[in-house]
Image (cartoon, helix red, strand yellow):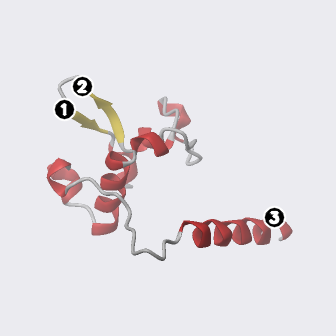
Amino acid sequence: MQRVTTIISFAGILLAACTSTSGGSVALAPKSMLSERILQAPENVQEAYRYALANQDVLSQIPCYCGCGGVAHTSNLDCYVAEISTDGTIAFDYHALG
């Protein structure tokens, strides 16, 4: 129980530290970058993919703990993006669709 309380407290501190009083917003890629399959998903799932596209540098530094290591995922970004070609074409990973 102590560990859960500590984690919740830490999460609250992070949220407070990340809250902007200057009206800042989270960077999201445009919906036009999403595949048709993702556009059929609920809005919050679409936003997760849009966040992943716009914040690849952040997600690539966060390990994924959902058990997808068995499918060669090395970071949280891998749950959303399988590959980005040199021409900018995005191959999505649909693992995050649920």
Q: Is residue 67 above or below residue 82?
A: below
Looking at the image, is 35 positioned above or below residue 60?
Answer: below
The residue depicted at 43 percent of the width and 38 percent of the height is 78
Residues marked 2 and 1 touching at CB (< 8 Å): yes
If you read the primary sequence from the N terminus, does the residue marked by circle 3 or circle 2 appear first?
3
SS at circle 1 = loop
- The circle on residue 71 is none
* Circles 3 and 1 in contact, beta carbons < 8 Å: no
Where is mark 1, residue-wise? 89
Residue farthest to the front, as pictured:
22
Marks 3 and 2, Cα distance to the nearest angstrom? 42 Å
First in residue order: circle 3 vs circle 1: 3
Q: Is residue 40 above or below residue 55?
A: below
Residue 49 locus on image (x, y percent):
32, 52
Quarter holding residue 64: top right
Residue type (three-letter) at the residue carrying disc 2: Ser
Give the labeled residue for mark 3. 3
Q: Which residue is mark 2?
A: 85
Query: In the image, what residue occupies the spot 58% across and 41% down?
Result: 63
Amino acid type, label 1: Thr
Name the amino acid type tagged 3: Arg
- Disc 1 packing (10 Å; few <14; some 14–19; many ≥20): few
Label 2 environment density (alpha carbons within 10 Å; few <14, some 14–19, many ≥20): few
| Distance between the alpha carbons at the discs numbered 2 and 1 | 5 Å
Residue 11 placement, left or right of 91: right
Could you tell me residue 79's position as x and y percent? 42, 43
Q: For the image shown, how many numbered marks are present on the structure?
A: 3
Left or right: 22 in relation to 54: right
Task: Say which of 76 and 56 sits in front.
Answer: 56
Q: Which of 50 and 78 lies nearest the eye of the viewer?
A: 50
Percent x, y for residue 96?
39, 51
